[in-house]
Amino acid sequence: MLLHPVIEETASVPPASPEPGACYIVGDQSSDDWTGKEGSIAGWIDGQWTFALPKNGLIVYDRQTGGSLVYRDGWVRHQTPTLPAGGITIDTEARATIEELVAILRHHGVFP
């Protein structure tokens, strides 16, 4: 389940018909089979839910958003930084470089 950590999404209610091997981050106020498992990774394996407790530093790819989450005493989603705009002095080369860096990080799944 954690050799290549990919989650389908963060959810509080288990899906009705999960695909074999599908993994989810259990969200707040979970219910049904996920009650009390908030923050865990739930994997549908052999017709039942298996849960893994994340450790600090674990990074997962979220297929729903196309971005990454990292566990640091709770799940943290990387936010795309606001690109520079306006100002008295405009450095077009620096802005172009920042925009390119953000695009590369999006391409690699760091930002959604």
Image (cartoon, helix red, strand yellow):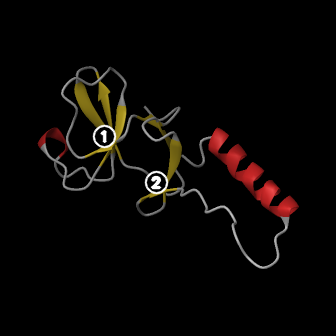
Q: How far from the left and from the top, in percent, is residue 108?
A: 65, 40
Report, in whole angstroms, how far the alpha carbon at label 1 lies from the one at label 2.
13 Å
Q: Which residue is mark 2?
A: 55
The front one of 100 and 42 is 100
Please state, as top left, top right, bottom left or bottom right, where the N terminus lies in the image: top left
Residue plotted at (23% across, 46% down): 12
Describe residue 30's horizontal placement relative to residue 68 as left or right.
left
The front one of 15 and 93 is 93
Describe residue 42's horizontal placement relative to residue 64 as left or right.
left
Residue plotted at (70% across, 71% down): 86
4 up-or-down from 35: above or below: above
Label of residue 19 in the image = none
Describe residue 69's horizontal placement relative to residue 95 as left or right.
left
Count every numbered label the image shows and give the total.
2
Residue plotted at (69% across, 67% down): 85
- Asked if the residues shown at circle 1 and circle 2 are in contact, with their CB atoms under 8 angstroms apart, the answer is no
Q: What's under tag 1, amino acid-wise?
A: Phe
Residue occupying the far left of the picture? 32
Mark 2 surroundings within 10 Å by alpha-carbon count, few (fewer than 14), some (14 through 19), many (20 or more): few
Question: Is any part of residue 59 visible from this angle?
Answer: no
Helix, strand or loop for disc 2: loop
Q: Which residue is mark 1?
A: 51
Residue plotted at (18% across, 27% down): 16
Mark 1 surroundings within 10 Å by alpha-carbon count, few (fewer than 14), some (14 through 19), many (20 or more): many
Question: Is any part of residue 13 visible from this angle?
Answer: yes
34 up-or-down from 63: above or below: below
Residue occupying the far bottom of the picture? 88
Helix, strand or loop for disc 1: strand
94 up-or-down from 66: above or below: below
Q: How far from the left and from the top, in percent, is residue 68?
A: 53, 46
